[in-house]
Image: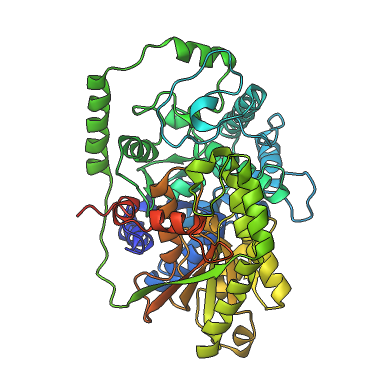
Amino acid sequence: GDAIGSGKTAVTIALILAGVVKARENGSVETGRSGATLVVVPPGLVQQWDDERKKFTKNKLKCITIDCTNSLKKYSVDEICKADMVIVPAGIIEERPKSGNKTRPYTEHLVKKAKANKIPPAPTGFSQREAPTIEGTWVRNMASGPEIYVGNNGKQRTRDEQAYYGNCYSQAITQLRTQKFDAKERGVPLEYFTWERIVIDECHETLVTATGMKQTEIAGDFKAQARRGAREFLGVAQFDIRKRPLVAATGVWGLTGTPLLETEARVTELANLMGGTYLTGAAHHWRKEERESGRDLFLNQQEGSKSREYRCAIQEACHLYVTEACQRNRGAELQVKLTREKHAVNMSESDGKRFLKEIAALQLESYSITPDQLGEKASNALSISASSKSRHAALVSTIDSIHENEPDTKIIVFANAFYGGHEAALDALTTSKKQFCHISENDTVQEQNETISWFRHVDATEEDRSRPRILLLSFEQAAGHNLQEACHSVILYDPMYSGTDAVADASVEEQAVGRVMRQGQKFDVTVTRILVRGPDGERSLDDWIVERNLDEDVLRAATSNFD
């Protein structure tokens, strides 16, 4: 739970290096005991972790990177047991070929090695939306779950599919662990081994459902499936540690720069992440309920509400757990300056008419409204604002302005994927004919890492200098990247808004800015926000959201900065 950029990766690598001699002694090919630390990361961070390992240890640690099933097949049991680090993307069990066919290489390979029954794919629909808090009451006779307090319209059929998926995966692992593999056997699934320790980087990212994404989009749907697969891979629903897919001999570490400790719910969530189970004070947490039967949900409803004394005791226990188990470091104060600028533009008359038409059904006639006033209509109004031609033009002119002063500088553009901002920014850059890069959910892990690496390092060759100067990322893709060495200009295409949780949205924006405003940055950083107002400059949704996200109290909560 360190502050952003305070060295979670470096501290973890130092921990591995400090205990490497003893860890190597613990390795045993015969029992499948690896001396390696298994590092489970979001897909775009695989190469970055290996680069950091090289930077800090000069190859003193033997590292294996496994970005797909084919790379796993290159390594023998002996090599994995004698490695010091193994780096793997969290969603590997839901890996799909780039060709777009429906094969699932990892689970099919696991079934073959384990001689087990077929594992179905993760459900394509969601059974549980993530609630803004872990409080609430289930409503009887509602197959969709707690619609009234989290906007959840999941289906019981999908809960059943999730439970079946997890059960088949668990049975395959049990079968796998009864097998015996020769030291030279290659491609043995990761679940077979016992690891020295397990490190889950950006643990909040790998375990959070992508709420707000359009489930009908292939890329968005695959991302949601990959996250469901990641939850199975990390064993969040398996209470018996010995039966979890990933087993550690000495401990499990979760790394996050956004612990968000300002409420009981968030403290409980972090305690649950670190404890490896979702039971601490939240027996009916959504990640458990996403796989429960109708009978389970009915029995949950029969339990009485907890007293205030009980809830206070839970809160105190969670805080004690976090204090004891969570190492929270603060980095040295940065010596570079952060400048936040706003580029405000007026929407066109036609966009203004579309906007007013959208909100007219609510008897509202002002551009200066809040998403709370719009309620369910907020998504349509925000989509109109995000796709405004004025915003398109502002993005292009901001890039031109930056490159006028620094022609070769690299620019990072972040956009909100919840209401079409990322899609609109992609369209704006494509139309402008500017060279740029972006991360597609259809890219392989290797392709994602290669693209990101171009913006992690300063140009060293003519080939480097010939590459695009612009990288477009969604806010969801922000966490974890170290871009401070080569970048110091950031554009926020539209403000982050996902719902009523201001702290969560501000946290996401700070994560984005933190990709360049972090230890190791040698230049002053400029963050330019694009705001769209009414046709005559009227205050708008953008103004309200930006003011909310930049509120001092909200920012303190978002960065857990209560010192």
* Residue at the left extreme of this rendering: 563
**In the foreground, 70 or 297:** 297
Q: Toward which corner of the image does residue 2 lie, by quadrant?
A: bottom left
Query: Residue 460: percent from the left, percent from the top?
Result: 54, 87
Query: Residue 253: percent from the left, percent from the top?
Result: 37, 47
Answer above or below: position of 560 versus 264: below
**In the foreground, 326 or 559:** 559
Quadrant in which the C terminus appears: bottom left
Query: Residue 4: percent from the left, percent from the top?
Result: 36, 60
Answer above or below: position of 279 versus 261: above
Q: In this view, does 139 lie to the left or right of 250?
A: right
- Judge whether residue 562 can be spotted in this image: yes
Answer above or below: position of 389 versus 206: below
**In the foreground, 169 or 511:** 511
Query: Residue 415: percent from the left, percent from the top?
Result: 56, 61
- Judge whether residue 199 can be spotted in this image: no
Q: In this view, does 509 lie to the left or right of 16?
A: right
